[in-house]
Amino acid sequence: MLLAVEVSFTEANESFTLCLRLSSVFKRIGTLLPKDSDGWGHASSLTTTMSLTAKDKKMVKAFWAKVAGKAEDIGCDALSRTLVVYPQTKTYFSHWKDLSPGSAPVRKHGGTIMGGISLAVASIDDISAGLLALSELHAFKLRVDPANFKILSHNILVVLAILFPNDFNPEAHVAMDKFLAAVGRALSEKYR
Amino acid sequence: MVQWTDFERATIQSVFEKMDYDDVGPAALSRCLVVYPWTQRYFGNFGNLYNAAAIQGNPMVAAHGKTVLHGLDRAVKNMDDIKATYAELSVLHSEKLRVDPDNFRLLADCLTIVVAARMGAAFTADVQRAFQKFLAVVVSSLGKQYH
């Protein structure tokens, strides 16, 4: 069910009228929200999850098919950038001898991460189910702060832009951004 | 005051010197409107923003993208006092335009992606770090006068 709301914010005094018009829309949205145990629908789960549409899934699968051949390079570069541009992420790898961009442990681990992403693409219709084992690994063993999933996702997108400047157009970008956010959510599902 | 290393200063000057503002500006803004569609709320009078093709072909979006990039130039030329450079623009975005400052971060991310695509392998991890640091300072300065 689609709800289209057209708004304009040109005058401050229109906002009151807008609130009145929107309240009937919100009541309708309230009936559609997933219900919690207290019987209330929570807007946050509607506004922040921004779930994958059929169009998104099609785009992700098509784009991934184009880029999968370079998965290890992508993973290596994305992880290298994460460690350089966001130095606090190095705290998770104090057990590695060499944290420099493109080093052997970085390349190997970048490949491992991309394997997980590939699995998520294959499980795109139920990412939570597909990544269950990885979710438990991240929750109980690795305990990577979920903020870092956003950081790594950003760097994956940067690498995709560098390697595929024409294919990584705005439509591919929004689908991949939503997909990687969904992967991050699936990985943090068991955290608490 | 923000401390810049010689590498960071040189990198920022070099990246912006080589940049085609009239290409990158429109590309970054249109990407932002597609990837984060809620940002379209500020452009109600821009006409057709109905889909990605419409946004990317929209002449008002292109014109505004150029305006934004040329505005960024002020920070490039005044790296030692970006906060003061953008004080007036911060007031404008807060009081008149009423833009949620989180949008500056979203546009900055899209700009990073577009610059990465244009520069290719030359956009190394070290260049990325300098570029993102610069944009973080810009974003922070634009949000400074909100109250």
Image: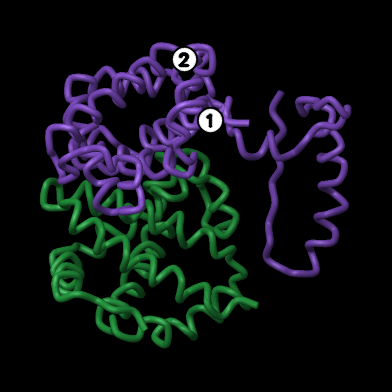
**Badge number at residue A106:** none
Q: Is residue B101 left or right of residue A8?
A: left
At label 2, the amino acid type is Ala
Q: Secondary structure at mark 2?
A: helix
Q: Could you tell which of marks 1 and 2 lies nearer the N-terminus?
A: 2
The residues bearing labels 1 and 2 have C-alpha atoms spaced at a distance of 12 Å
**Residue in the picture at 41% in, 51% down:** B58
Where residue A72 appears, as percent x and y from the top left, is 19, 26
Callout 2: residue from which chain?
A: A
* Towards the viewer: A111 or A59: A111
Residue A154: image quadrant is top left
Chain letter for purple, please.
A
Which colour represents chain B?
green
A139 relative to B21, above or below: above
Crowd tier of the residue under label 2, counting other residues whose Cα lies within 10 Å: few below 14, some 14–19, many 20 or above: few
At label 1, the amino acid type is Ser
Q: Which residue is mark 1?
A: A188
| Viewport quadrant of the N terminus of chain B | bottom left
**Residue in the picture at 45% in, 59% down:** B105
Callout 1: residue from which chain?
A: A
**Residue in the picture at 27% in, 17% down:** A65
Where residue A38 appears, as percent x and y from the top left, is 88, 29
Q: Which residue is mark 2?
A: A133
Where residue A76 appears, as percent x and y from the top left, is 20, 34
Where residue A19 appears, as percent x and y from the top left, is 83, 54
* Towards the viewer: A25 or A105: A105
* Towards the viewer: A139 or B67: A139
- Name the image colouring: by chain
Q: Secondary structure at mark 1?
A: helix
